[in-house]
Image: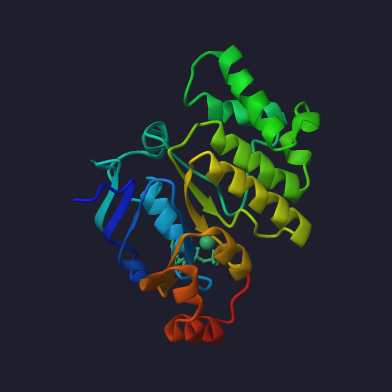
């Protein structure tokens, strides 16, 4: 049997009578970038919350690195090597930029000196060194998104889940983030990438999973997905915004 790094198997998530995710299955292999797309309310963020232990699944299984993880807490999932960014970035505003990244690093070390070294290195690779001592809350959105990336990369994840990391950014800022993701990919990262900007998704993803009204509508290469009539119909009918 092929060993996937992440396997989402028949996952459903209900909120009362609202079926946010219904019977979704897909797998992610090491060093792949998988796009997760779909109209607003399709269930993308909910699926991330189920994968990372923030929500219990209603049914189904999440397997990470051969281990069933859907009964674990978010911090336990993180320690196994999975990190996620938030659609609405929420740095610890009263802490400095450096300290925010150190919080990530503390999931791989309990030594402050070492956490600081890891954080300094991540800030450098994001071009954030000059902001290290600034309060995180004071950063503009473009830099907050880079800080979010630095924080999760400081956990040295095997799998990175990015929830609209380019959302709310202008073209220049988006291109800067995409360049960073390409660099991370060259280092062998495995990523699930939620994004509305199809140009960004198709330029960076090996495969794409499409959700619509909580269900998996399609899965395939960027070319297969952009030519899929069901996908086109879901997007044209959906009136979607970032
Ligand atoms: N904590 C919650 N409690 C109740 N319902 C929720 C909760 N979180 C999400 N939902 C519902 O689940 C459905 C899917 O929402 P979700 O945020 O996962 O969509 P999404 O694909 O991430 O959308 P967007 O592109 O706008 O971010 C929606 O109907 C939403 O109202
Ligand atoms: Mg979302």
Q: Position of residue 92 (x, y in %)?
A: 64, 36
Question: In the picture, residue 186 is in which quadrant?
Answer: top right
Residue 113 appears left or right of 77 = right
Residue 75 as seen in the image, left or right of residue 61: right
Residue found 51% across the figure and 59% down from its top: 205
Colour mapping used in the image: rainbow
Figure disc tally:
0
Instruction: Classify residue 120 as left or right of residue 61.
Output: right
Residue 159 picture location, percent across and down: 44, 43
Q: Residue at x 48, y 82 (%)?
A: 234
> Which residue occupies 31% across, 39% down?
72
Q: Can the viewer see residue 80?
A: yes
Position of 168 relative to 32 (above/below): below
Which residue appears at 65% of the width and 59% of the height?
167
Residue 171 lies, in percent from the top left, at 75, 61
Query: Can residue 95 be seen from the camera position used here?
Result: no
Query: In this orientation, which residue lies closer to the viewer: 51 or 183?
Result: 183
Residue at the limit of the structure toward the right, as seen here:
130
User: Which quadrant of the figure contains the C terminus?
Assistant: bottom right
Nearest the viewer among 110 and 146 is 146
Residue 60, how many percent across, how many down? 24, 57
């Amino acid at each position: 049997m092929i060993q996937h790094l992440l396997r989402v198997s028949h996952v459903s998530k209900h909120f009362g009578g609202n079926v946010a995710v219904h019977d979704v299955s897909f797998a992610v292999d090491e060093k792949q970038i998988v796009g997760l797309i779909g109209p607003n309310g399709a269930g993308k963020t909910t699926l991330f919350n189920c994968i990372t232990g923030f929500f219990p699944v209603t049914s189904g299984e999440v397997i990470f690195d051969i281990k069933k993880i859907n009964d674990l807490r978010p911090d336990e999932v993180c320690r196994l090597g999975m990190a996620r960014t938030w659609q609405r970035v929420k740095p610890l505003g009263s802490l400095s930029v450096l300290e925010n990244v150190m919080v990530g690093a503390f999931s791989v070390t309990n030594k402050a000196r070492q956490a600081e070294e890891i954080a300094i290195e991540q800030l450098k690779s994001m071009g954030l060194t000059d902001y290290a001592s600034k309060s995180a809350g004071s950063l503009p959105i473009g830099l907050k998104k880079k800080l979010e990336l630095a924080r999760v990369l400081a956990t040295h994840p095997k799998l990175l889940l990015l929830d609209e990391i380019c959302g709310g950014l202008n073209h220049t800022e988006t291109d800067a983030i995409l360049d960073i993701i390409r660099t991370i990919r060259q280092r062998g990262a495995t990523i699930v990438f939620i994004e509305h900007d199809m140009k960004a998704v198709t330029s960076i993803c090996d495969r794409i999973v499409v959700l619509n009204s909580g269900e998996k509508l399609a899965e395939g290469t960027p070319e297969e997905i952009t030519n899929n009539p069901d996908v086109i119909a879901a997007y044209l009918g959906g009136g979607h915004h970032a």
